[in-house]
Amino acid sequence: MNEPRPDHILQVGLGFWASKTLLSAVEMELFTELAKHPENLETLQGRLGLHPRSARDFFDALVALKFLERRDGQYYNTPSTDLFLDKRKPSYIGGLLEMANSRLYPFWSQLTTALRTGLPQNEIKNGTPNPFTAIYAEPARLREFLKAMTGISRGANLAIARGFPWSKYRTAVDVGTAQGDLITQVALANPHIEGTGFDLPEVGPIFEEHVEANRLSGRVKFSPGSFVDQPLPKADVVMMGHILHDWNLETKRMLVRKAYEALPDGGAYIVYESIIDDDRSTNAFGLLMSLNMLIETADGFDYTGADCAGWMTEAGFRETRVEHLIGPDSMVIGIK
Amino acid sequence: MNEPRPDHILQVGLGFWASKTLLSAVEMELFTELAKHPENLETLQGRLGLHPRSARDFFDALVALKFLERRDGQYYNTPSTDLFLDKRKPSYIGGLLEMANSRLYPFWSQLTTALRTGLPQNEIKNGTPNPFTAIYAEPARLREFLKAMTGISRGANLAIARGFPWSKYRTAVDVGTAQGDLITQVALANPHIEGTGFDLPEVGPIFEEHVEANRLSGRVKFSPGSFVDQPLPKADVVMMGHILHDWNLETKRMLVRKAYEALPDGGAYIVYESIIDDDRSTNAFGLLMSLNMLIETADGFDYTGADCAGWMTEAGFRETRVEHLIGPDSMVIGIK
């Protein structure tokens, strides 16, 4: 009848094989290469500098995993790897996977230690007090990190830009804006909106480059500052994407209060990331992201929609709701 | 319409999160603990020695991944984790995942180097000539490895025991038998079969323990020897599961010839593992297993059914066929 089978256990338990194969392909810019034109085995192997022993297995594994296609001996990108993993396209989301490959995959090998000690397992272990300090200290790593943030949030950014009732509001600030993709997508989809991206001064040049590439320099500005140490810029809508989960409960509550203070009556606060379902039993990605906060931060954690709505109510927001965006992402909206 | 979406890319690219979470749960014997009785958060956290920071996220992530259930604040195994991941049950397949956790996950972090150099990235890097030498040198690691092999092959072993026309044959030898699970399952399902397990002498005690646990000591014997250096024991059916892929082409062909020599006219040779589909475009697991051979061996690789049937025909087999077993596994059968 329904005898238990080990398939799901083995598939997930060895799932790091497929994961690392894709990460190595991104690292070696395979999809950027094939976006130029399809190539046969020998040419592609040569372009990537691969040893002949396993090149064919590597490419064919990516075919079987549906990241490449092979027709008449030529390898092609799929429509989605061509759009999202070609480094020369603005739709590139590989920054996240580059970071996953170079940092997170090895750090996660220490998950058991992290669970037993409650301590992060990233650069912090070597004495740097905060992963952002290390990242912000090197412009090349900062750019990688910020593009990674765009990669993980593009789909949700589009959903917010299209799905929120923007016609009721005129100004918006994106707190911890990184490359500025959320405020960019909001401004592109809503020509009446004037936007501000708020983040540390080092982020400015990378933000402005992204805004200019989208021809929004007239309506979208950068405002330098620290959301931990300073008040937030005032606006009709305050947004925080992938911010709250980095911090402990006390700082989360402080940030929610700051958002309240930056809004006019009737203003809206949008918090979004991979919000955990209230029963904590279905959004696996949100729960795993919280384990990633264990690996990456001193005391950050992810949370449910009910958790966040509770902090908003405590801060004075008169109305809250949770709306699903895309995949594992939801937004929690508070109205002042 | 069918706009490309990044979901599959992100899911696989960060798939190592779910993978490592399950591997850490197996490492800490979470499922063995819950097989005794369900437990609440505090008790389970204490039993596993977890820090309070992320224990709940860890268990709830396993709920969302469908490896645990949570009802009224108590965590339970699922039927399949209870059967396959409780260390005290003979159906335990976690040995494979223990090995994946302690060895393969970190070795695979060097996949890009492996692809660029063609060189393995396991203990061999430290000067040991062959991974099996290192494994066979330590009884505890040998036992872990052999149980791992049982874990990965149990489903296919049952399919061979039930699906092959055993009534035509009287004796069978399993070459590279490890714990002996294949010949054990064949003998359990076919009471007329007399079986032999052939492997290095160090394997004997672990094999005999498994056979005795299944009350087959009267019909299933261990025969010590090296399939590389010696002829194979003669039998009506010669089986090789997860053997050929460890070796280079020359040794593969030599082993196929040795099987031919060990069989009578009409005898059958069964080769099984995650045989790659002839088009090399659908069996992702088989192709990834071949990359695992890159990580683990000097020159091993996986192969298609057509490849193997070709080596059989060269060696003199008059008839060959490929039959699917279960999941990624197929068997190639040669009739002398």
Image: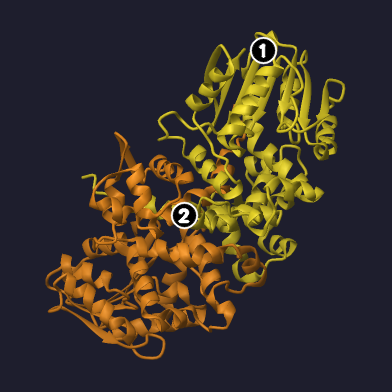
Chain colours: A yellow, B orange
Please state the horizontal and vertical placement of residue A201, each as a whole percent of the image.
83, 36
The amino acid beneath tag 2 is: Arg
Please state the horizontal and vertical placement of residue A170, each as a whole percent of the image.
75, 12
The total of numbered circles placed on residues is: 2
Say which residue appears at 85% left-offset and 26% top-offset: A215
**Tag shown at residue B273:** none
Q: Nearer the viewer, residue B268 or B96?
A: B96
Say which residue appears at 24% left-offset and 60% top-offset: B89
Say which residue appears at 75% left-offset and 18% top-offset: A234
A11 in relation to B140, above or below: above
The subunit letter for the residue under badge 2 reads A
Please state the horizontal and vertical placement of residue A245, each as a whole percent of the image.
59, 36
B328 relative position to B73: left or right:
right
**Mark in front: 1 vs 2:** 2
B13 in relation to B93, above or below: above
Dot 2 corresponds to which residue?
A116
- Do the dots labelled 1 and 2 sit on one chain? yes
B63 relative position to A196: left or right:
left
- Secondary structure under tag 2 reads helix
A70 relative position to A188: left or right:
left
Are there few (<14), some (14-19), or many (20+) residues within 10 Å of tag 2?
some
Query: Mark 1 and mark 2: span between their CA atoms?
Result: 43 Å
**Tag shown at residue A267:** 1
Q: Quadrant of the N terminus of chain A?
A: top left
